Each structure stands twice: as C-alpha cells, then as structure tokens.
Amino acid sequence: MWGTTWTVSEIGASRMPAFEMASIRQLIAGSIFVAFFLFFKKASFPSFKQFRWLTIMGVLMFVSANGLSTRSIQFIPAGLSALIGALYPLCVVIIEKVFFKNRKLTALTFCGLLLAIAGIAIVFYEDAFYSTGPSFWFGVFLSAVAMLSWSIGTVFLARNKMNMDPYYSVGWQMFIAGVILFILSFFTQPHTPFKDIPAAAWLSIGYLVVAGSLISFSAFLYSMKRLSPAIASLYAYINPLVAMVFGYFIVNEKLTMNILWGALITLTGVFLVNYSIRRAAQITEAEI
C-alpha cells in the first residue's frame, strides 16, 4: 500500500496544487488519529514540551519529507522519487558518522554505499539524458531534500525520545504538519477552492488518507514495535519497486530494464549498509 501512494500522489498532484493536497491529507488523517485518542482513549492534550517536540517532528517528517516529495512528483517520475527516498538509511549512517562520530564504517558499509550510488547513477542516466529543461533536476532536488529531512527526523527521534503513545504522537505530527502545509500552499502555489477540486483529486486524497496514512503508517509503527529492525525495514526495499511497477501500469511511467537494474543495485547497496551496521552492533554487544 505504501508503495502505491507515490503514484496516487502523482495523480492527485496533477489535478491540484501539491502542497494543498498534502495539507488536506495530513489534516484529515491527523484529525482522525487525534480524535480517536481524545474521545475514545481519553488522552490528555500534549504539554508545551511535547508540543514543541511534535512540531519539530511534524516539520521534518510530514511538512518537509512528505510535502516536498509530493511536490517533486510533479517534475519527476513517482518511482524515481520513491527510489531517492529509499536512500534515507544511507543518509542516516552518514549523518551519525559526520556529526556524532558513533558509526564504525566497515568495508561492507563502503561497498553498500558505492553500490547505491552506482544504481542511482544508472537510473539517472536512463532518465536525465532524455529529459529537457531544469524541471527534472528541480524535482530531483526536492526529492533529495525530502529524503534528507526524513533522515534528520529519524536521527532526531532516536536521540530525543518522548514518552507518548506513538500513534497519538503521529496524529499530532500529521495535524500540525497539515496546518503548516495549508499556510505554505497559499504562498507558494495557486490555491484551489474546495468546490473546484476535481473528483479524481478527492479520490486520491481519500486513498492517501486511508491506505497511506491510517493503514500503512499504523502497520509501520506496529512492525517497529513487534518485529526485529531487519524485518521491519523491509518496506524501504519494497516501496520503490512497487512505485515503479504501479506507475508503469497506472500512469504509463517509463520502466526499462536499465531502470529496474539500477533500482535493484541501489536497494542492494542500501541493504548491505543496513546489514553492516546491524552486524557491527551485534559484534559490539557480544564483546561487551
């Protein structure tokens, strides 16, 4: 389901401003999460400290990461944007190594990094040299910033945990992000009145809310709590492939053997980096 949301976002964003669509999606999904906990779980409102933490996470994970990735697919194929987003584990490793000096990079890690870069280069070669104008590279830039924001958010979450139900927390993050995105949409893109939003866009938003936010994100949080990190992280390898195949059949995006091979090489590199980090952590624990 999460993989299909890239293509559905592309369909919706082709019929209305991307930031406005993302804001409506996050407001609806966030409101459902928050309302459920307030009325059925009798949860209390976040404290000022919690609200500040929720705002930072909402900006990183949903305003920047989700909002910019939604905007990027107005310029580049949804599958390529999803593949760039899948590079976030590599970015997390680099951030922690450069800024916190707490990642031991092995030969296997470097091998994974090189494979990921090589795979992306293959996909770019297939796409970039057949695209005209700066819009393609602008879309790549937006997607890269979105991936970087998700990576920073992941590091921030790991280092600044908050004692709060994760589903309730995500609901507030989505709601806060929805408000910010709605304001942002007024200053960056032409605004479409609700009555003028076409039915196809509303159907896209509905699918993104139910399949992308409520079901997929809940499943992601549940898997992170119940499964080992190795298994829970499988979504990062599956999403781009689903997005590419789904985009090919639904919106006729280009899908060649070079793009598929490039994606597989990139995801293999991401897997090797993740595996090397887990292996190093296991060795360290065994030594202790």
Image (cartoon, helix red, strand yellow):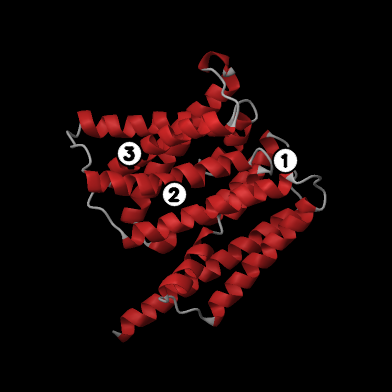
Residues under numbered marks 2 and 3 in contact, where contact means CB atoms less than 8 Å apart: no
Residue 241 visible in the snapshot: no
Is label 1 in a helix, a strand or a loop? Answer: loop
Residues under numbered marks 1 and 2 in contact, where contact means CB atoms less than 8 Å apart: no
Determine which quarter of the picture holds residue 270: bottom right
Query: Quick check: 144 left or right of 210?
Result: right
The three-letter code of the residue at mark 3 reads Trp
Instruction: From the image, tell me which residue sits under label 1.
Output: 253
Neighbor class of circle 3 (other Cα within 10 Å; few <14, some 14-19, many 20+) is many
Determine which quarter of the picture holds residue 55: top left
| Tag nearer the camera, 1 or 3 | 3
Q: Where is residue 17 in the image (x, y as percent from the top left)?
A: 59, 29
Is label 2 in a helix, a strand or a loop? Answer: helix
Between residue 121 and residue 223, name the one nearer to us: 121
Query: Quick check: 63 left or right of 111?
Result: left
Instruction: From the image, tell me which residue sits under label 2.
Output: 60
The three-letter code of the residue at mark 2 reads Leu
